[in-house]
Amino acid sequence: MAFFLRRRSLIRILLLVALALVIRLFVSPSSPASSVTSFYSTDSQEIRKQNVLDFVAGSDKPLDVHRHKFLQVRMGRDEREDLFTDIITDGVLDYWERFEKPYIVGRDTAHMDEQSVLSAIEQLLTLNGWVAALCPTLARPFMQNKAEDAYEDLARQDHLYYIGMVIHSADHFLVDQLAVIVQMTRRLGSSNLFVSMLDYDSSDSTETLTDLCEAVLTLLGVPFRIRRVPGMTEDPVAAYYPLEEAYTRNLVLEPLYELYAKRKIKFHRVVWLKGFTCPNDILETIKLSASNDAAMVCGMDWAEHNGFFIFSDRWRTRDINGDQFRQSKSTSITTSPVSSVPPRDAVGAVRYSQHLPFQVLCCESGTHVVDPAQSYYAGIRYRAGTDFHNASTPADAPVRDPEGKCQDSAQMWFCRDLWVWKARQGLHALEADGGADGGAGVHTHPIVRRAEDEEEIQQLSQDQEHSDNDNEDAKRQNEELSPRQGGKADADANVGSDYDASDLELADPPPVETVPDQVELNIPNSVFLPARIMVNPRCVTTYAGVKHTQLALDLFGPPDREEGDEEMKAKDVLDRWEGAPDTFVCQEQVRTGGRRAPKSQRRLSFSIHQELEESLS
Ligand SMILES: *[C@@H]1O[C@H](CO)[C@@H](O)[C@H](O)[C@H]1NC(C)=O
């Protein structure tokens, strides 16, 4: 039955693609024959600079696709011919010439055609995908799903949102991702979004599905750039994954920079869609991002593993102590003590188990929301280490400096850059203040903060105790809850894994190479203004094979459970932000070999002071 439905949906989708093709022919001013070829051609249409006419005929919608053709662009379409290319092109042309064109241009039939386009758009707006259709029924705390009109305020603000996606052979959830975009369009308005999709060297049916995305977005009037690029290297042995991450991310952002440079269009938030995330969870995360004035808010991503769901993005996530998240099961909140949930730091763990957002050193975890004003517009780009060994060259692997820069994920580089940028902002503010004591730039002194930590944790763990009827567990929690840099060593704390994406096999963690003693920095990171990076555990990202209803139950309990909504939700806004940890777990790829290249681990110091000095020299 499910299969049958799926096939029916697929046929509907194919019909839509055909319809869109016809519409493209219809709206194109040139002759049908030439526009068929132009549809398949790779003209790169950059964003045009604003000209006098734009100012004179200024529209209040800067992203109006009907005025600016360059707002809907397809680049680098995969044009490799296959067996059926000729047959299909002939068929499409024939159909157009004999059945569509006369009907569309005919005086007495044209209005009916217009009507059918309008109803197609209406139908598209209800596109809810296969998984996305489930979203409204899934359990969420604080009645997140029931508040149907809770996102009206977002719509009223009329902000611009930029949706970024990197697709690398991930056709299994692209249709659902498209459904999410359509749902967001419905909420936020079609000219309030820009969709940037990058197909990085996919070899599955991503090509066909990006055609579908193009068709749907064209019909809905959503501005987009869909672009396909070949891989950086043909041989996987010569590919360095963090470099690929940085390269693809920056390419996705190109229209963002162009729109700003050439048309002064600024986006309020950038939403990176990865895996599958329910539309409401994304909207909620956007709200959290604004209320916390956060540089980045991430969801949490869960993958199916032997019938369980486990937290999966450990490659790019570090808690506020710089430790790696645990590969916890989704049931860890309800079945085990706070010391077994994904974040290891005491405050984060307690907040996680209360479904509240918590601060981290770095995250990505599927769908995440970035404030471009605190990052991209400030000049931060994605980058990766260059000190790796290229295994496809004859040279021997170099001897590594144990304190050398971490060759980790592009996201970890991005996070460190966010921390350093924010610290610099703080210093500028301080200078502007004439260097007055306790100015805006300097955070509370670390020793004072340590004491505050203690108090807060006491408070938090008491809360936890109340809601926990298992006294043994509660006792254990209190023993294990420890402020930063104290407490019991967690045997698992430095254990890594090379599991970071849905298509990777779970592997046994590689051995820890070195764990130096606690580092003493000349100037501790805690004196600098902290970056605001946080994880929203209520924003769930999943991959194929996840039973969403079960996952939601594991994480949040039965749907009707009412928690002290208002009171708890007030805690969504963090009132204290920690400084960066002085060390972190560096999990790195020191040699090429694609995304499956082995990773090794060491604990490394992170000195914002040193980074600031380096950037000055
Ligand atoms: C590794 O070396 C090969 C051969 O010189 C080159 O083609 C490839 O781009 C290099 N890989 C990286 C990531 O620089």
Image: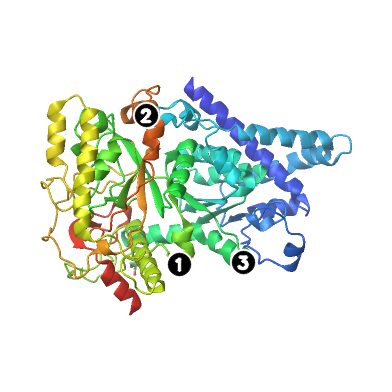
| Mark positioned earlier in the residue sequence (3 or 2) | 3
Q: Position of residue 9 (x, y in %)?
A: 56, 29
Q: Dot 3, crowdedness within 10 Å: few (<14), some or many (≥20)?
A: some
Q: Dot 2, crowdedness within 10 Å: few (<14), some or many (≥20)?
A: few
State the residue at coordinates (53%, 24%). 5
Q: CA distance from mark 3 to mark 2?
A: 48 Å
Report how many numbered discs are placed on residues in the image.
3
Closer to the camera, 356 or 114? 356
Residue with the most extreme top position: 1
Q: Position of residue 145 (x, y in %)?
A: 47, 30
Q: Which mark is residue 262?
A: 3
Quadrant for residue 341, please give it: top left
**Which residue carries the number 2 mark?**
564
**Which residue carries the number 1 mark?**
379
Q: Is mark 2 within 8 Å of ligand 1?
A: no
| Tag nearer the camera, 2 or 1 | 2
Residue with the most extreme bottom position: 617
